[in-house]
Image: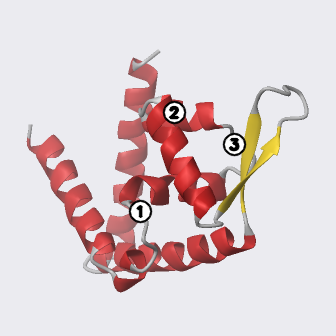
């Protein structure tokens, strides 16, 4: 279906644009750890198992990406106060700085992507995508 192809094309072009940026290249991180960094920034105290569910990746992939972020001093683990076997993830100061830099870049790329849409079209696009997402979420139950 044409919609799926367009979603794929837009997502690929967006990722290519983000990946081509000097800022992202200077992080020495691959795409997946950057996605995890952003998820932790938006969800402080998240557990790795939540990242597994959200990302559709296995525990090993998530564990390696978290260790990579830790080795760069971007993420730290904190023991879960309710479950001593589990831990929660938080950004370090350096992790917050990197996320803020990447988020600003993401916002700039998004603005470039929608620059030819007027406010009504942007609002309509958001409404339509929200409805599509709701339909998928409802259908998964």
Residue lying farthest left? Answer: 2
Is residue 110 shown above or below 5? Answer: below
Q: Secondary structure at mark 1?
A: helix
Q: Mark 2 and 3 residues: CB-CB less than 8 Å, in contact?
A: no
| Mark 1 or mark 2: whose residue is earlier in sequence | 2
From the viewer's side, name the closer residue of 77 and 54.
77
Which mark is nearer the camera, 1 or 2? Answer: 2
Q: Secondary structure at mark 3?
A: loop
| Residue tagged 1 | 123
Which quarter of the rendering shows the N terminus? top left
Position of residue 31 in the picture relative to residue 103 (left or right): left
Q: How many residues crowd around disc 3 within 10 Å: few (fewer than 14), some, or many (20 or more)? A: some
| Residue tagged 3 | 46
Residue lying farthest right? Answer: 81
Q: What is the tally of numbered marks visible in this picture? A: 3
Residue 25: image location, x then y, percent: 36, 77
Residue 96: image location, x then y, percent: 67, 71
Q: How many residues crowd around disc 1 within 10 Å: few (fewer than 14), some, or many (20 or more)? A: few
Residue at (58, 66) in percent of width and height: 72
Residue lying farthest top? Answer: 141
| Mark 3 or mark 1: whose residue is earlier in sequence | 3
Residue 4: image location, x then y, percent: 17, 42
From the viewer's side, name the closer residue of 34 and 141.
34
Residue 127: image location, x then y, percent: 41, 51
Indicate the quadrant where residue 111 lies.
bottom left
Residue at (32, 66) in percent of width and height: 121
| Residue tagged 2 | 52
**What is the C-alpha distance between the residues marked 3 and 1?**
31 Å
């Amino acid at each position: 279906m044409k919609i799926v192809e367009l979603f794929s094309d837009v997502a690929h072009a967006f990722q290519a644009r983000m990946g081509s940026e000097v800022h992202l290249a200077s992080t020495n991180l691959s795409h997946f750890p950057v996605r995890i960094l952003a998820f932790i920034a938006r969800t402080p105290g998240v557990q790795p198992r939540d990242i597994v569910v959200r990302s559709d990746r296995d525990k090993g992939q998530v564990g390696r990406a978290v260790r990579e972020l830790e080795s760069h001093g971007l993420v730290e683990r904190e023991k879960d106060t309710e479950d001593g076997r589990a831990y929660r993830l938080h950004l370090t100061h350096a992790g917050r700085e990197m996320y803020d830099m990447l988020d600003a870049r993401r916002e700039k790329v998004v603005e470039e992507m929608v620059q030819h849409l007027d406010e009504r079209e942007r609002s309509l696009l958001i409404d339509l995508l929200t409805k599509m997402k709701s339909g998928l979420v409802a259908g998964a139950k």
